Image: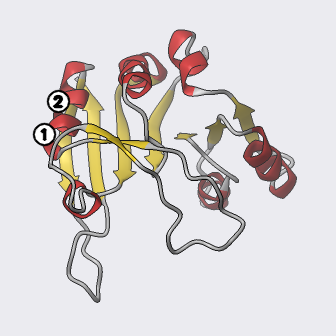
Amino acid sequence: MLDLGCGEGWLCRALQRLGIRAWGVDATARLVEAAKAADPAGDYQCLDYAAFSQQPPERQVDLVACNFSLFGAEELERLTASLPRVLNRGGHLVIQTLHPHVACGDAPYADGWREGSWAGFDATFRDPAPWYFRTLESWVALLNDNGLRLEVLGEPLHPDTGKPASLLLAARVA
């Protein structure tokens, strides 16, 4: 499996403990270094989404996981278009992201750039990057337009608020 936007590699390590071969890719060199330090035998690569999209690695996987790692607009469209070349026939893409209902806030429910926030994180997180808000319809269209068929849409609820905690999208190469 490929953890696209692997950060410090926690998901790769967890899956490897279960006997699943995992490959982590992230654009932030500091995070990839932390992943390698925590897992010297692990398979981690520093590569941004533009480079990945233009020349997907000559590797194929059964699963690509994107866990809160997709925040752009055009670069995300190019990245999504490149994923069928990385996925084996019948391979899956699983995305966990901000739920549009909750992430929309008071802004209009329309695709567009939003200010970033590290609310709820400690002081080491500074200068949040802007991110591209997508409606649910936009997420589904992004997958369909790029040869991926949505099979599961999940909306796990926060146990205290009862509001969606995230959006889960599982798609298969069409």
| Relative height, residue 170 to residue 56 (above, below) | below
Q: How is the image coloured?
A: secondary structure
- Whether the residues at callouts 2 and 1 have beta carbons within 8 Å, the answer is yes
**Where is residue 19 drawn, in percent x and y?**
62, 54
> In the image, is 45 to the left or to the right of 159?
right
- Type of amino acid at the residue the image marks with label 2: Ala
Give me the disc on residue 137.
1
What mark, if any, has residue 34 been given in the picture?
Answer: none
**Local crowd size for mark 2, using a 10 Å CA cut-off: few (<14), some (14–19), many (≥20):** some
Q: Secondary structure at mark 2?
A: helix
| x, y percent for residue 90 | 31, 28
Q: As rendered, which of 20 and 74 lies closer to the eye?
A: 74
Q: Position of residue 2 (x, y in %)?
A: 55, 38
* Image point (77%, 38%), residue name: 29
**Closer-to-camera residue (85/166):** 166
User: What residue is rendered at 52% in x and 23% in y?
Assistant: 60
Using residue 2 as the reference point, say whether residue 165 is left or right of it.
left
Viewport quadrant of the C terminus? top left
Mark 1 closeness class: few <14, some 14–19, many ≥20 residues within 10 Å:
few
| 164 or 83: nearer the viewer | 164
Q: Amino acid at mark 1?
A: Glu
Residue 43, x across and y down, in percent: 74, 38
Which residue is at the front of the view, 115 or 120?
Answer: 115
Residue position marked by numbered label 2 in the rendering: 141
Q: Is residue 11 left or right of residue 80?
A: right
Q: Secondary structure at mark 1?
A: helix
Residue at screen point 57% across, 10% down: 55
The residue under the point 72% across, 32% down is 46
Does 151 appear above or below 47?
A: below
Mark 2 vs mark 1, CA separation in Å: 6 Å
Quarter occupied by residue 78:
top left
